[in-house]
Image (tube, rainbow, N blue to C red):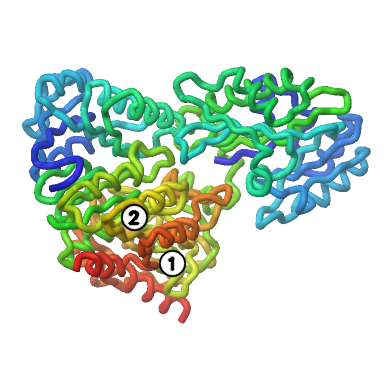
Amino acid sequence: MKIHEYQAKQIFARYGVPIPAGDVASTPAEARAIAEKIGKRVVVKSQVHVGGRGKAGGIKLASNPDEAEQVASQILGMDIKGLTVEKVLVEEACNIAQEYYLGITLDRAAQKNLLMVSAAGGIDIEEVAESTPEKIARIHIDPAVGLREYQMRQALFSAGIERTAVNGAVKFLKALYKAYLDIDCSLAEINPLVLTGEGTLIAADAKINIDDNALYRHPDLAQFAEEGEDDPIEAEAHRRGLQYVRLGGEIGVIGNGAGLVMGTLDEVKDAGGAPANFLDIGGGAKAEVVANALDLVLSDPNVKGLLFNIFGGITRGDEVARGIIEGAKRVDVKVPIVVRLTGTNAEEGREILKSTDLVPAETMQEAAAKIVELAYR
Amino acid sequence: MSILVNKETKVVVQGITGREGQFHTRQMIAFGTQVVAGVTPGKAGQEVEGVPVFDTVAEAVSATGANVSVIFVPAAFAPDACLEAADAGVELAVLLTEGIPINDMVGVVHHIRHNTNTRLLGGNCPGLITPGECKVGIIPGNIVTPGPVGMIARSGTLAYEIVSSLTRNGLGQTTVVGIGGDPVPGTRFIDVLPLFEADPATKVIVMIGEIGGTDEEDAAEFIQTMKKPVVAFISGRTAPPGKRMGHAGAIVSGGKGTAKAKVEALTAAGVPVPESSRDIAALVQERLS
């Protein structure tokens, strides 16, 4: 789960990390009020879940409350990489002398968490990693003993952080690491960590991704999840407990098992169609889940056809068939539906679907070809 | 021959009294697996499907000689269950549970790999099956048949899809191993490939990967040192970056884990990677004849 910059900063602040004075605004008037309260030059930052906000014009300076109101009105409602800006963070602008990068994330290849520090902060760390990897100091964290202070110093010194700032930066790393473990992050970043002209350190930007698997033990983070959904159908899927990803095309896809659904999306694309979504009903889904999935996918107005690909193992074909019929009753189905059912109780399922308008298919390739033909006819 | 499990394998089921545990114990026994013990803390003395239940894995192992454990316990308790199985000294612990926090698995995988003699398979995996001999986990028994193909897959249902097409085409399997869709799995492709390479009955290996991580690229490097032919498939070619496609591990992030990079690495290692899974059987057939 991605959370917004202002939320990540709230979390880091709880761990004693200094952050610029500021607050979040949904209207230009609110932005003005925050700027008045700060009483200094401010920066107005769009709160959306994508990188490159600055380049897209979603981050602007304002030297007084009038200007803050004006730039907030430009940024609010703006479209950044397909996402609409609904909130801006208005905060005191830092007097930047140096910008550093601090981050912890999972290194899947090493199966360990990885600390990264760079003196080339402020820009996309992936770009630094790509073009000048030697500018990033990396330390793998041993799960048994954790990240030690000497390792933090080692990383900071070898990254070329200003020597006078190293001891101060260790405090940021300790907080970053503690937050990373406490709230089960998959990524925690302070980028940039700003060394100001006055010689102080402050977290000018922050990013936290939380491991979805661990949300059950962080009920306090549920409010962030509510605000974190960018897409209304994805938000509804989340409420219904369905694994749904919107993809923007016209062919709705529902299947059981993530790998099988991904494989089905590939087949749809190869057949000349554009998938509207990924939806995995999981293992052992009952009719109710299937009905819920069907009506969710059809709530996307772009959908021109729907494909079910079910390989029964724990999931039973007759349950799926009953779910499809139940779901089709709930909504006015205007698009063709192709159903490929195989595995456990598939015959019973096919029997149930016999007397309907649903189009049967034997293999997933045939199913993909059929739905593409019917949907775009 | 086969790898990891065979007719001598003695299985202990952790979480045997739960709904899934009971159901799949029945299925495993019906397949012919020797399920010798179950574990549910506080329920020692009961029986499930005629299998005695113990309070701890250590007791189950010492009373029955179980050497493989299969774990059907909820995510919050699963890391502990893995460590308990390893502590009791089983050779293989098969973790089916989905949704375990990643940082928990970082610790569990690290400990089991470095401090114990146990191999952990999973989490979020369907288990493994040696046709005609032993099934540990939930892979449907009716889609496999004995033969010369070794199979390793990240995704469960996609493995079912492909294994049943192999079976339909008369291409049986030595062992089918589901390694699971989590970002920090106990067993990776590179851990299983050498086992198939060393198994005399396995003639061809089918490897089913998906987007996310670099395990397929690591496997491609290892395959260059192998003698046996490998056929691969990668799902998620059309998945957009930054979106988690169901499996916690199936995500393209930071430019890593794309299907394109995986297909390129495998192709460079001489491994055919068909665009459609329907072409796998023919490629396997070619390599057998």
Foreground mark, 2 or 1?
2
Contact? badges 2 and 1 (CB < 8 Å): no
Please state the chain letter of the residue tagged with numbered disc 1 in the rendered image: A
Is residue A26 at least partly visible in the picture? no
Q: Is residue A283 left or right of residue A247?
A: left
Q: Which residue is mark 1?
A: A332
Viewer-proximal residue, B68 or B206?
B206
Is residue A1 at least partly visible in the picture? yes
Q: Is residue B37 above or below residue A336?
A: above
Q: Residue furthest left?
A: B50
Viewer-proximal residue, B4 or A358?
B4
Disc 1 is placed on an element classified as: loop
Name the residue rendered at 79%, 45% in the picture: A59
Q: Which mark is residue B208?
A: 2
Label 2 – label 1 distance at C-alpha? 39 Å
> Counting other residues with Cα less than 10 Å from the Cα at mark 1, is it few (<14), some (14-19), or many (20 or more)?
few
> Counting other residues with Cα less than 10 Å from the Cα at mark 2, is it few (<14), some (14-19), or many (20 or more)?
many
Name the residue rendered at 52%, 36% in the picture: A106
Name the residue rendered at 23%, 53% in the picture: B150
- Quadrant of the image occupied by residue A23: top right
